[in-house]
Structure formats: C-alpha cells, structure tokens
Image (cartoon, rainbow, N blue to C red):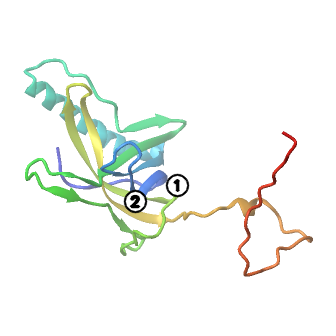
Amino acid sequence: MSDNANISVLGEFVYPHLNKPDVRFNEAGEYKLTLKVPQKQALGMVTLIDKELEASMAEAEKENKGKKIKQAPKPYKLEDGFAHFKFKMKATGINRKTKEAFSQRPALFDAEKNPFPHSQSIWGGTKGKVAFIAKGYYVPALGAGVTLQLKAVQIIDLVEGGSKQGDLFEKEDGYKVQETNEVQSSEVQTSTDF
C-alpha cells in the first residue's frame, strides 16, 4: 500500500463538495466528489485500484490466519460506457495515533497550478483531475476494500452556479420590467369562498 498520491485522468465532476464539506449524513463533514470518466480512458485507474484491492484482501486474510475474507464494495462503478470514481476526505476528526483533533480540506488549483480560491463555487459538470491515495482497509462487517482518499483537485474547465433558466427562452419584443429601487413584497390573496 503506497502513500504516494496518484493523479486521475481528466474527468467530469459529479456532485462535488469541494468548497464546503457535506454534513448531510456525517456531522463531522466530508469533502467528496465523483469523477465521471469514459471507460476506455479509465483503464489505468481501474487497474491501479484493483491491484490495491487484491493487496488489501491478501493483508486481511493474513491478519485473520487465512480465513476467507469478503470483498467490500469497490470505490468505482462501470456503467453506460463510463467509470464513476468516488473520492472523499474527512473534514474533521480525531487522529488515531496522536488523539488530537484535526481539520482539513482538499487543496484546489486552476489549470496553471495556481491556488484556486475556496470561496469560488465548483459545480457539477466541472472538468478536472484529482490527486488521491488508494488506501486499503479491513472492517469485519464490510470486508476488505479500498478507499480513494481525496488530496487535491485541479480545475481545468470550471462550471459555476447560478440559475440558467433564463437561457431557456429567446429574447422577444414585449413587456419589460422597469427598474425600481422598491423591494417587491409578495401578496397573499385571501378568499372567503371556503
């Protein structure tokens, strides 16, 4: 098991949580993203992860005196001609060795390796590369597996947030909103019919 970072191939970010940690299912927070890559371009990454998985299985069997160990779910899926790799990083926690609290976030870079501001939104559809460590683990309930620990991200083609619903229409002649300094309040119509 190597602690050297690997660099992914270029892919599309799906549900990235890189600016703020996701706390929906884990209140300690987790930075994460799924990288969608055409399956033909993902072969090297799949091979690397499968080798780490074999090593993790062998290590778990050795530690359990040859007992058959089940395989945990892989950190990737192959479907519809694409590979979907799941990367994650704990935002906060307690170090197992030192027992000290820690806080961390992934390093973000632009295409020219300049630091990318954490305040700038990164949305799904962004294209980039991920620096990660493939780390083996063994948990009796799950089995032996590999997790892809997120370390850093390079943004190649940024997609930012904002509503694009106005782009659905063509410009037309007709009514145009007049600019005013008034704050519009929403009216609630009451009815006595009920």
Please state if 122 lies on the left or on the right of 20 as rendered. right
From the top left corner, tell me how far across and down residue 7 is, in percent.
32, 56
From the top left corner, tell me how far across and down residue 137 is, in percent.
20, 36
Residue at coordinates 26% horizontally, 60% vertically from top-left?
Answer: 104
Q: Tell me the kind of residue under disc 2.
A: Lys
Q: Residue lying farthest right?
A: 174
From the top left corner, tell me how far across and down residue 166 is, in percent.
74, 63
Q: Which mark is residue 20?
A: 2
Nearer to us in this view, 178 or 48: 178
Q: Please name the residue that numbered disc 1 is placed on.
A: 124
Say which element carries label 2: strand
- State the CA–CA distance, disc 2 to disc 1: 14 Å
Say which element carries label 1: loop
Question: N-terminal of the two: label 2 or label 1?
Answer: 2
Please state if 61 lies on the left or on the right of 192 as rendered. left
Nearer to us in this view, 123 or 182: 182
Q: Is residue 17 above or below residue 66?
A: below
Q: Which mark is residue 9?
A: none
Please state if 170 lies on the left or on the right of 67 as rendered. right
Q: Quadrant of residue 21?
A: bottom left
